[in-house]
Amino acid sequence: MIIDALQYNNWSEKIFNQLREGGVTAVHVTITYHEDFRETVENIIAWNRRFEQFPDLIRPAGSAEEVQAAASENRTAIIFGCQNCSPIEDDIGLVEILHGLGIRFMQLSYNNQSLLATGCYENEDPGITRMGKQVIGEMNRVGMVVDMSHSAERSTLEAIEISERPIAITHANPSFWHPALRNKSEQVLKELSQNGGMLGFSMYPHHLKDKSECTLESFCEMVARTAELMGADQIGFGSDLCQDQPDSVVEWMRNGTWTRERDYGEGSAGQAGFPEQPDWFRDNRDYPKILIGLKEVGFSDEEIEGISGKNWLQFFEESFGALKPNA
Amino acid sequence: MIIDALQYNNWSEKIFNQLREGGVTAVHVTITYHEDFRETVENIIAWNRRFEQFPDLIRPAGSAEEVQAAASENRTAIIFGCQNCSPIEDDIGLVEILHGLGIRFMQLSYNNQSLLATGCYENEDPGITRMGKQVIGEMNRVGMVVDMSHSAERSTLEAIEISERPIAITHANPSFWHPALRNKSEQVLKELSQNGGMLGFSMYPHHLKDKSECTLESFCEMVARTAELMGADQIGFGSDLCQDQPDSVVEWMRNGTWTRERDYGEGSAGQAGFPEQPDWFRDNRDYPKILIGLKEVGFSDEEIEGISGKNWLQFFEESFGALKPNA
């Protein structure tokens, strides 16, 4: 079972077929970067049309049981999530509404300061805000996972501490391997795992050592070092694959409507577009290669089963349901 | 000429008549506390109906010239402003749109962290955010005044520094007189005045020494001390009058939709509602008493003319127009 905890592709029948060829059982797909509630609902409607159009390839999933059902049906389970808290606008009541619409992950911030937390591109990180504390409690209650992939260090540490349920960093790598702003410190990774959280390894070139030139061996050695730090049962994949997207999309991800200047984020004026994927992960059909790479750096079959999917499945099992009143 | 730089009344013909009786030439009225863009537009529509219904008492104003026209027409000029940046949502393009709709003041935050700046009720204040810097530039360009009345200390100091045009604190008092969270430090007031900014004195009991029991003499002495600090030409009134509002409104101001607990803001569980106004400022008809009080603490007639209205008029003259391309 392979589970990928973050993709934002320009979805098509071709990509759904590649998910099947690669043996991918479930994908957490990004519904929102900057969209507000109403725009997020529109993106869910677009997914409803895809589910109607490709019923043999994909199905929606909001629970571990539905992911397992997808596996037995030979389809890929699609799990919804948001990379920003923009869909709840300034209304805590929208957390429960969005859970009802199938959203299972929400980042407390994207790259900038949000109403809840700080993004990794701000100069200062004051931690979780007053509203942020309230919203974490509500996400815990209804069963929506706090995702801190794009958040800054202090906000992330505070979210781990404040959240009563394990949180996730769905797509990032350790900064000891590649010190990108988006990658995570050892302290964050340790506290994440000590609190039952999960890390999804990114295969987005800006998060990789040597970027597009990164080797599979280097990636798998990094996975092994991270397993020593966090345990092999609290890591998985979160590729951040943005397949077939035009460069206008990465410009929109970075700039949204918040600035009148142009922000290049992880890129630069000279390399403003999407970077080229490493040759060992062009698309979902390459997943079997990565499993072989993990074997070669010494992981056992059982550990590889966990990293490739069972760890995320276990996390979904514990995270997607409402807290019981007496729990 | 009397100008009041902040009121949020439950508007009625009675109150418009009281403005006329008190000789109030212009009022900056709050259009938005938590409302988004569309809800703000709805509040402007409600004002359009009032302008139609009471053409002999009020008129809209978006410039110093229109305020002067109101004076000669014997009407009260109504200037629109927002106590939060919620109406621009996450879209910098809405700054110019809102200026086109008549908005002339916008607070970068209300009590909590916003996308732009920090409110005075947060534990931490990281200063102006990435988006905040962009939005201040855009407000400068189109002629919308940065108002930091509810913002925290560091954010306020940074806004003064970043803004290329003078900013305002439309409704607050010095904390040397009454150390409320909403009142302002000497450093803030000094830097505000050194950069050409204006302070409007609040008559909201939580901002007054001895609250509802505050005396007119104490208030006027505080004005005199502030004039020594800031200059008599950079201070005015911003009463924060919330006349005829039910207590449900102050609960909404404090809690909006951001929390599932109940926040009492400047109040407390025992005193959750609006506080009683001091006996020397029950409503706009009391303004002449305050002018006498200012005379009694030693202000000259010319200084009183400035504090009561001409200072704000001068500030409007310099602040409400677009920056010229070559200016």
Image: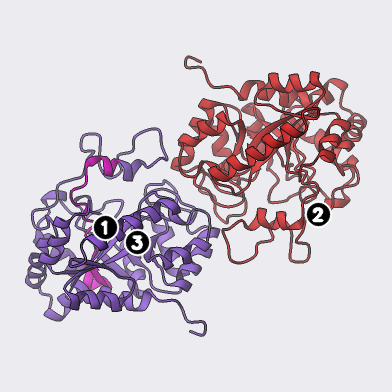
Chain colours: A red, B purple
Label 1 or label 2, whichever lies nearer to me, is 2
Q: Check disc 2 and report its element: helix, strand or loop.
A: loop
Q: Is residue A291 positioned above or below A118 on the image? A: above
Compute the Cα span from label 2 to label 3.
44 Å
Compute the Cα span from label 3 to label 1.
24 Å
Three-letter code, disc 1: Ser
The magenta span reads B226-251
Label 2 or label 3, whichever lies nearer to me, is 3
Q: Which residue is denoted by mark 2 in the rendering?
A: A275
Chain at numbered mark 2: A
Q: Check disc 3 and report its element: helix, strand or loop.
A: strand
Q: Which residue is denoted by mark 3 in the rendering?
A: B81
Q: Which residue is denoted by mark 1 in the rendering?
A: B175
**Residue B109 got which mark?**
none
Residues at badges 3 and 1 in contact (C-beta under 8 Å)? no
Q: Is residue A130 positioned above or below B161 on the image? A: above
